[in-house]
Amino acid sequence: MRKELEKRLERAMAYQTALTLFEWDNETLAPEEAGPYTARVQGILSEAYQEVMTDPQMRELLEEAEQENVPGEENTDVDRAVIREAKEELDRLACIPPREYRAYQELVADSARICAKARKENDFESFAPTLEKIVFWQKKFAGYQAKEGQKLYDVMLDTYEKGFDMAHLDPFFELLRKEIVPLLHQVMNADSVSIDDSFLSGEYDEDKQRELGEFLAKYVGFDFKKGVLATSAHPFTTNLHNHDVRITTHYKDRVDSSLFSVIHESGHAVYEMGIADELTQTLVGQGASMGMHESQSRFFENLIGRSEAFWVPLYGKLKELFPEELRGVGREMFVRAINKVQPGLIRTEADELTYSLHVLVRYELEKKLIEEDLDVRELPKLWGDLYEKYLGIRPANDAEGVLQDIHWAQGSFGYFPSYALGSAFGAQMYAYMRTQMDVDGLLETGKLEVIREYLREHVHRFGKMKTSAEIIRDMTGEDFNPHYYVNYLKDKYQKLYRLNLE
Amino acid sequence: MRKELEKRLERAMAYQTALTLFEWDNETLAPEEAGPYTARVQGILSEAYQEVMTDPQMRELLEEAEQENVPGEENTDVDRAVIREAKEELDRLACIPPREYRAYQELVADSARICAKARKENDFESFAPTLEKIVFWQKKFAGYQAKEGQKLYDVMLDTYEKGFDMAHLDPFFELLRKEIVPLLHQVMNADSVSIDDSFLSGEYDEDKQRELGEFLAKYVGFDFKKGVLATSAHPFTTNLHNHDVRITTHYKDRVDSSLFSVIHESGHAVYEMGIADELTQTLVGQGASMGMHESQSRFFENLIGRSEAFWVPLYGKLKELFPEELRGVGREMFVRAINKVQPGLIRTEADELTYSLHVLVRYELEKKLIEEDLDVRELPKLWGDLYEKYLGIRPANDAEGVLQDIHWAQGSFGYFPSYALGSAFGAQMYAYMRTQMDVDGLLETGKLEVIREYLREHVHRFGKMKTSAEIIRDMTGEDFNPHYYVNYLKDKYQKLYRLNLE
């Protein structure tokens, strides 16, 4: 690759890394009143990033680099992938008139705050005009970016998960709806089984929760020489590069909340820490997609973390930390409790079975908003209708309904499906891995590193060198197949709730 | 000011702010192995800063802006000051050939580590070749920057303290030498007085030290809505802007170490928090100079913080936190202990009386290195000789001698005098303030905010709009006069050690 191109891409990377550090700092440490001043700095860095990526010379340099007709400047595979990503990013950014982009940026700079305020005051109306504008701009930008005949929502979906457009997602969600809704119904009517999870709530000491969190993070492979665990309002993972990956958690009265947050975020972190050194700090040095990322975090959190086998070597540690709180609670009882199904209104607190139904609601609403020009003011009612239809419950107010997520306020339309896709990617990997190794046996004997190394080898190290579809095909020998996910859920909950096998 | 110029200066500011955040993060949180990867990002951001400041168009824009001949683009006073600072920075950066600057940057990127290793292994020889090269480049760069006839060390001094060149500093340090050395001699021979400070060392609980630190920071005016207190190996202050100022401390077995570190760093922080909103995030939105900064930190730490009056409303709090450790220790005994004179080898641990003598040693050695081509290999012996001459003690090895500071390893020649100047600036302000208000009475009644507000009004809010010399003249009505400092020390230690007044 030519030095000049390399230099410009490095600079873009440096701006992004600085922006990541500011975001981390804002969420974990920055003082209360720093906001507007620091936002200025972030705005300027964003603009600098935008400028270096969309500079007319950048396109020339990329096209020249693709030719590979200068001796000594041949591209490696990584170069080729970087050039491809850079061109896509350039196309995405360059087609939007700067003035419109700035207007949009100004709008979303404050929208999360407006949404949070509306949530606090349970007043959707005060957020509706902002949301309406965000939808307007998002559609406008998607229109600029759309290839001929491409639908607007498909443009948005493509940002988060290449190759998973509505033509793929409609049947995927239809399958989930068709299979999970009746399964949930069966579970809720399984009167012969009652699961006690009351002991998960209580006065769990924060210091001990922290000790447990650090222990579990290390246990699943989080390397503290390359990472940091801190506290924030909502758990998240971020990374500066593969040698600096940071996760957060929160400490609540429900011990399983921080416990599974830490395992979930460690799953994201183990992915980023496992990306090859030759890729980090380039445009392909991140996880393949949002869905692939969720596949790893949810793999560790659910497929492994909520299994009986996982807790065989660990439950003693938990009892040691909380002898009072877990008095009389055996391992089996504990594992049943952390798998209890309970349809609720809040996505981030959902159990493994109902989780995808929360995502399904959002997918259907996003399609209506983007493709059918749904008036945002109709969202609250539709939201309630869909929750009632799929989960059998209806929010009493908008705070626990349409206002609960931050995504739309941030302009992230098309992001939600990744959560459900990730669960399904993970289930397919899990099913395949069980044919290759004794997963339960490894977990029971505390040999989690064998599982993690397998994932590193087949998923993590590639970064964005492969798409999620390619990763799954190369690893499991078949294309993405959501039936693995459905079968996993059926199998698990039929056993747990002693349902009649149909 | 023209928009284009404003935009470029804003961008330079954003790069600097990002670099500051990276430095903070490296010192307080970043994981062990992140170093080399993050250093790449920092290198790229430094280069971007350099580029925006030295762009040929920048000089044109600055010169154009100085003309003020475009209607509607008149300069405010702040604009004028910013333009002046920008031109100085541009001159400083632009005269150094980029290739040489890069060679130097590569050298110092690793020099602190080499110096730390040499310190650990008590092996000056292993650091000498690096130090020799740093001196070589520093002199070369000063040569590029020198105005006609200007001496090289004066160029370096000017970077940290405008207007205080050798012609000013020679008599200043001569005065200190002449007055403090014999005063120290008298103190050490004052056999009738023995001060017990043994109780300051002990197993002081870290959590309680932290509680005390937060309490004291708030007490002297550190606003936690605009700041953060964290832990690092060596205490320091940094700021992103006037609404985000951060200090660190360390917790040692000697309680006065963290206690006075926090007050010292809070002094720096109160300065930065007090800079006017219209200046922050511009080139004049920082403290006036290194010396003026030290004047504020040392004002709070020593002139106020070690006074009897300061502890009147506070000593009860201290006793409450450490009832065991301070059993039988009254306030008077405590205040005498925190003022005990004890010539030592380490500058950062020096008492108020001997502190300037440590600085004097470094000033004399820097002059020899820069102006007299002293071979760096002669430093250890000369260091020992000067310590013996001024402080009556000689380091047993280089670790507690010439290798103790980080400054030379970082290429900061000309910085040390600021520490002594700052003490003297502060003493002059203190003497003047005592003619304007009842300083002791305010301290005794816990009304520190009156003192702090006075400093904000006369020092802090101006940022770099005035030089340190102007600040002192405008505030006290006379030019800088180091006799206030000498008189303060004489008065204080004659009383404490019951010396005969000469």
Image: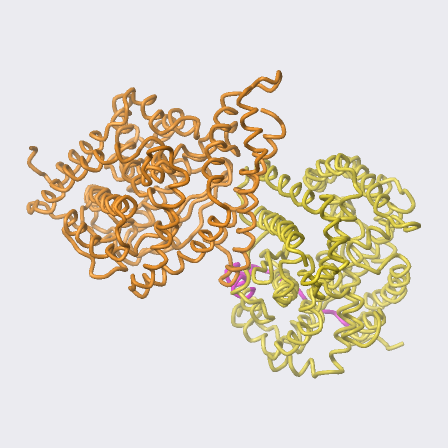
Chain colours: A orange, B yellow
Q: Position of residue A240 (x, y in %)?
A: 51, 40
Total numbered labels placed on residues in the image: 0
**What is the quadrant of residue B175 in the picture?**
bottom right
| Drawn side of residue A418 relative to residue A337, left or right | right
Give the magenta range.
Answer: B193-213
Nearer to me, A120 or A492: A120
**What is the quadrant of residue B375 in the picture?**
top right
Please state, as top left, top right, bottom left or bottom right, where the N terminus of chain A lies in the image.
top right
Is residue B23 shown above or below A95? below
Residue at 61% in and 60% down: B258
Is residue A290 shown above or below B178? above
* Magenta stretch contains residue A494: no
Q: Position of residue A346 (x, y in %)?
A: 26, 52
Is residue A267 shown above or below A428? below
Q: Position of residue B81 (x, y in %)?
A: 73, 61
| Drawn side of residue B129 relative to residue A363, left or right | right
* Magenta stretch contains residue B202: yes
Regarding residue B346, the answer to whether it shows in the image is yes
Q: Position of residue A482 (x, y in %)?
A: 23, 31
Regarding residue B252, the answer to whether it shows in the image is no
